[in-house]
Image (spheres, coloured by chain):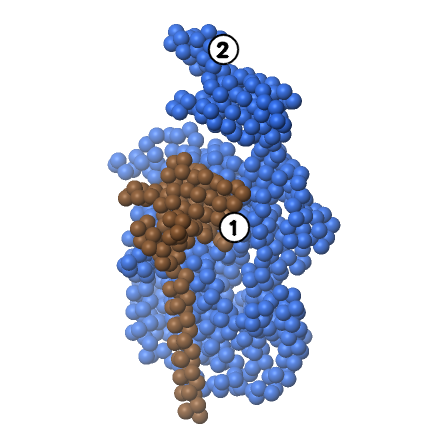
Amino acid sequence: MKIKKNRIYLFGILLLVAFAGFSFTAFKDSMTPYVSYDRAKEGDRIVQVAGALEKGSYSYAAARESLFFTLQDPKSKQTLRVRYKGLKPANFEDAISIVAIGHYDEKAKEFEANKLLVKCPSKYQGAEVEKTYS
Amino acid sequence: MDYLSHIYLPGAVALWSALIFALATMWGYALSLTAPAGDTGALTFARRSYSFFALAIFLTAFVLSMLLMARDFRVEYVFQYSGMDLPGYYQLAAFWAGQKGSFMIWLFWGTMLGLLVRKTTGKSEPAVMGIYTLTLLGLLLILVRENPFVMLSRTPVDGQGLNPLLQDNWMVIHPPIMFIGYAATAIPFSFAMAALWRRKYDGWAARAFPWALGGFLVLGTAILMGGYWAYKTLGWGGYWGWDPVENASFIPWLFGTVLIHGLYMERTKGRYRRANYVLTFLTYISVLYGTFLTRSGVLADFSVHSFVDLGISGWLTLLLGGFMLLGLYLIVTRWKEIPTAPNEDPMLSRGMFLVLGTITILIAAFVITAGTSAPLLTRFMESQSQVGPSFYNRVNLPIAMLVAFLLAFVPYLTWKGNPASEILRKMALPIAFSVIVAVAAAVWRVRDVFHLIFILLAALALATNLQKTIDKYRAGGFKAMGGYLTHVGVGVILLGIIASSGYDQSTKVTLTQGAPKKLDGMTLTFKRFIPRQGREKERMEIEVAGAGRAPFMVYPKLFVNDRTRQTMVNPDIKSSPFQDLYVSPIEFDPGQPRLELAKGQSGQIGDMEVRFVRFNLEMDGNAVAALNAGHSSTVGAELAITKAGRTFNVTPVYRLNPATGTVETPPTSLPGGGTITVAGINTGNGAVQIETTGVASPMKLSIDVTRKPLIQLVWGGLYVVLLGGILTMIQRFRQARVLDRLEA
């Protein structure tokens, strides 16, 4: 009886270790680090970049449902051209800050965003309006 | 005295007296702990102090509400979250719209709950209430520091108004309920810590059990409401997004789930006697930790609705650290003394399955905590990161499957263990049911093997527990069925989640007014734009035909808030028993655009191509000379318009009177109907802005159309869980009362 119990515990511990390993890989896979534009341009993984919308830099190609714009880093003043396939988010023009999640497309020399988080000026402490739901 | 002149005294005095009475309460309870038997002077003093403390907190909240109702904008908090145009009803929502008010409502509920807790403590009152008051003191100190009654040095005529997103019925009801749930987690914690402190390890579980259940229920209700709000009104597309603020309420709920099972085990089998101290600790600490994560600004860049730092991170850290140290100290120093019963259950027994189930849910809670803390964990690495919803979904899928598996067997397992053949025989009907459900799912659309197993297990959990609920009801009425009913609900929710999230179909489409558009089996037609009528905002009328039923209309809303110029979106949902059709507007093009054209540039309005030829400065004498002389000056914009192959010229004018500053822009008629107007002149680049009316330019509406199968199961299942929980709670309060009679 004693031995059987120990075996069950051992099995349980193995299962836990396996699950911990699985969680850790899932964690690493879905991690999207905030990076500088230079780092993003290495294009090796999904990252998020943040910046301000450069004035007058956006255009919307309705036929292809694609949005193009330039992000500017408020500190370093570096810029990054971004392409987003999808409809233009509401309040896009008023955004004080935009977070783009995606990866850098070497060929097109553009950052290809799969998701945009548009933060609008708001009095509610930090109540940004954009969806993060996908 | 300078500080005093910048504070609204009636409120602040109430707050400060609350602090004094809270300290007096703790002092009184401390004295009564050491008082000789029969000497109840200190206890009476402590009770009175607590009552005064509660009164002071009530007054503090009352004064703040009155200031909001009176729209007294001298007070900074009122100025920040209220406004003249805010309806009275939402003044209540403004109470908890900001950081300070949220802590206030939390403290308010905590204090009021304390009045009830006091009556259920029996002989352990001094220690339990002492620790409970200490938890309230932590919140109170934050408020004393971040005083909500700070006044501005001037008196603004209007406030900044409440964020339009929060002007919603859910905002009136959801946050206060959430904070009752938060406040309630401190109750089992206080019972447990008091038991450790006094080294009286018996009896507290029975008293804390109904409170743990109550907290679990209230928090669950609040989470349900939050999901409903996100789904029905905010148009976030789903009810759950694994956002840090959502997780901050879900993690304590998971710990609370484990805690009520632990307390159940302690009450029925005398097991989990050590674990329950840790579980009350985890439940309460996770509330503080979640508050720290979402309120201290560490996640500001990562969440949809985290609050920015108000300068209270230090206090929150202190609060979190303080209670962690206190809890850990008591648990570690008493650990060896706590009586335990060894685990001698065979593998196939109810006890063993409960242990496995609690471990599984604990793992879920820790994994979600780790995910939510990702920005904190990666802070010192190369780059700060967060993890996306995919992490939570992937990790929780196997966890949910294991939970469903365990739930399915629990009803027919006995404490002593029974043979597998007997269990399976009793489960014959449920097994048949779940196989049918899984086959139906496979026939429908589910091809993923893991999802099929998930559905099989969830259906099995639903069915065995339902069978047992019916048995229990037949045997003993409502009394004994609560727990099983809750598990039925869990099975239902799991089925709803997998169907609505795993098999939803979403399409983004742009509709032109009057032009039907086919979209997988449906025909959508954007009929018309309905202007604002009173308090009813602008709506879009869309006809949906061929969705397997008679044509119907949906009315999503899209409007601009007058005050903040924010674009607001309200989806419309057409629910049918098997799916929701979720229509959320994305962008509306009213079809009468302004064009800004530089010299020589052309643009399209409706069926016209407009080219800006040049400015005409000689419309009514020389415009520049007139302007310099201070006379009324007229500028014409020569436009070449091409329509249906014909080109004609029009010259609408822009008249400025520099003396009065008035601008006149008379509309110019267009051949074939409609008018054109110069809306403005951009002196910077010499461009002209033109506007048309009555030109055939169709309205366009972009929408997101999502079909969410079986989402009703998510809501329905949650209601079943809550109903089962209420039945159990009533039962446990009754049992705790029996204990009072025994002690007396």
Nearest the viewer among A49 and B212 is A49
Q: Say which chain is brown.
A: A
Q: Which residue is at a point 41% across and 42% down the rendered structure image? A: A69
Going by the numbered disc 2, the residue's amino acid type is Met
Looking at the rendered structure, the secondary structure element under dot 2 is: loop
Q: Is residue B45 left or right of residue B484?
A: left
- Residue beneath the point at 66% across and 59% down: B578
Within 10 angstroms of label 2, few (less than 14), some, or many (20 or more) residues? some
Q: Distance of mark 1 from mark 2, alpha carbons? A: 53 Å
Q: Residue at x 54, y 26 (%)?
A: B610
Q: Chain of mark 2?
A: B
Q: Position of residue B381 (x, y in %)?
A: 28, 60
The blue-tinted chain is: B
Q: Nearer the viewer, residue B499 or A110?
A: A110
Q: Are marks 1 and 2 in contact (CB under 8 Å)?
A: no
| Disc 1: which residue | B236
Marked residue nearer the N-terminal end (1 or 2) = 1
Q: Residue at x 52, y 45 (%)?
A: A64
- Secondary structure, mark 1, is loop
